[in-house]
Image (tube, grey):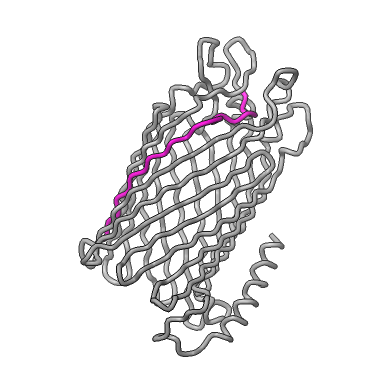
Amino acid sequence: MKKIVITGWALMSLLQLSAQNTPKDSTTYKSTKLKIEEINLVSSLYQQEGNNSSVTGGIGTEKLTDISNTLDVKLFKYDKTGIKHNWDIEVGIDHYSSASSDKIDLQANSSASSADNRFYPSVTYSRENEEKAQTISFGLSSSMEYDYQSFGGTVGFSKLTKSKNGEFIAKFQTYLDQVKMILPIELRGPGAPSGSEARNTFAGSLGYSQIVNKNFQLLFLVDVVQQSGYLSLPFHRVYFTDGTVHQENLPDSRLKLPVSVRGSYFLGDNIILRGYYRYYTDDWKLTAHTLDLEVPVKISPFISVSPFYRYYSQQGTKYFKGYEEHTAASEFFTSNYDLSTFDSQFFGAGIKFTPLKGVFGIQHLNTLEVRYGHYNRSTALSSNIISINLKYK
């Protein structure tokens, strides 16, 4: 946690200097120089408990702790033709410790897999033609940890309707991943898989948002996601009814089809109702429903609270069975409870401060938000997360 505090204070010092050098009157000037539009620093602490670890075949501890820090910098400039150019640069670093991953080697008191770091930078560029009310964007991303590497690309397009009350959205994403073949220790030996295996994901999204009236807004979104390659995790054990242990084995392709709708309704000036529903299905015969409600309430001009609640219900894949429930007759098998049938709830609240003179007296450091959430699942998995967001604008 000490590193988080140092990072936060160092950032605030830089922002204070930047704020002091900002021209006082720039409301009518469209700069051709690159400027900071917004900076977000988000730090979070996540802790999890459970007893259905996939590493030990659907039984055993799922205890996990994750400390995450993300810095997101948004920049913009206008060129001489009036086109707005935006850059979004994000860098994230996670450090996690996992008791279940430590059980890849059942005989070890502690191993390299018990803790790891994940580094995930990304950059997105968008070109916005405000006169034609259309935007095109391109992005690159990466995620690196000890046993997993991912490289991604994104292309997006959006255009407002003539009335400016509606917007069409299209996006295509791809992720090219490599999974390091770290097997449970008792399954290693001559002829066992080694090196790494490829996993590719291609996703297309189509959306439409509409301002129905001054109080009501809607967004409709349809996704198509195709995955291919090695879709199992090599260190997930599966125990058969005869007591033998095997490596998780799942199909090498998966087609996902989520459909969602999101709405916002403004109850006067101080209360917003934000609702969300998503239906999900895939060709592994897994289906799910998600309902989400958040109600931001402005207590004063400078403070607002946002209680939220999410309910999730999932009908698990046909490839799932628990500890010592699979038989040799199964072609594909997993004991990963993320693919089982369960219900879950996630609830909590956030509080946002937007002081008139800025957070800590720094005028452009205009927002401090703290959020807490508690998650529980019908498989006896539970977790807590607390996050802090500092925004400079």
Tell me, yes or no, whether the highlighted magenta stretch contains residue 47: no
Magenta stretch, main secondary structure class: strand
In the rendered image, the vertical position of residue 194 relative to residue 127, given as above or below: above
Residue depicted at 69% across the width and 27% down the height = 194
User: Which quadrant holds residue 165?
Assistant: bottom left
User: Which quadrant holds residue 19?
Assistant: bottom right
Q: Is residue 36 left or right of residue 301?
A: right
Q: x, y (%) of residue 224?
A: 38, 40
Along the line of sight, the residue nearer the viewer: 206 or 38: 206
Q: x, y (%) of residue 98?
A: 67, 40
In the rendered image, the vertical position of residue 216 relative to residue 261, given as above or below: below
Residue depicted at 37% across the width and 56% down the height = 157
State the quadrant of the N terminus: bottom right
Q: Which residues are magenta?
A: 216-237
Q: x, y (%) of residue 237?
A: 62, 24
Along the line of sight, the residue nearer the viewer: 341 or 86: 86
In the rendered image, the vertical position of residue 260 relative to residue 13, given as above or below: above
Q: x, y (%) of residue 318?
A: 43, 22
Total labels drawn: 0
Q: Is residue 329 left or right of residue 96?
A: left
Tell me, yes or no, whether the highlighted magenta stretch contains residue 227: yes
Residue depicted at 58% across the width and 86% down the height = 20
Q: Is residue 265 left or right of residue 13?
A: left
Along the line of sight, the residue nearer the viewer: 320 or 273: 320
Residue depicted at 56% across the width and 60% down the height = 90
Q: Pick out the residue farthest to the front.
A: 81
Q: Is residue 97 left or right of residue 262?
A: right
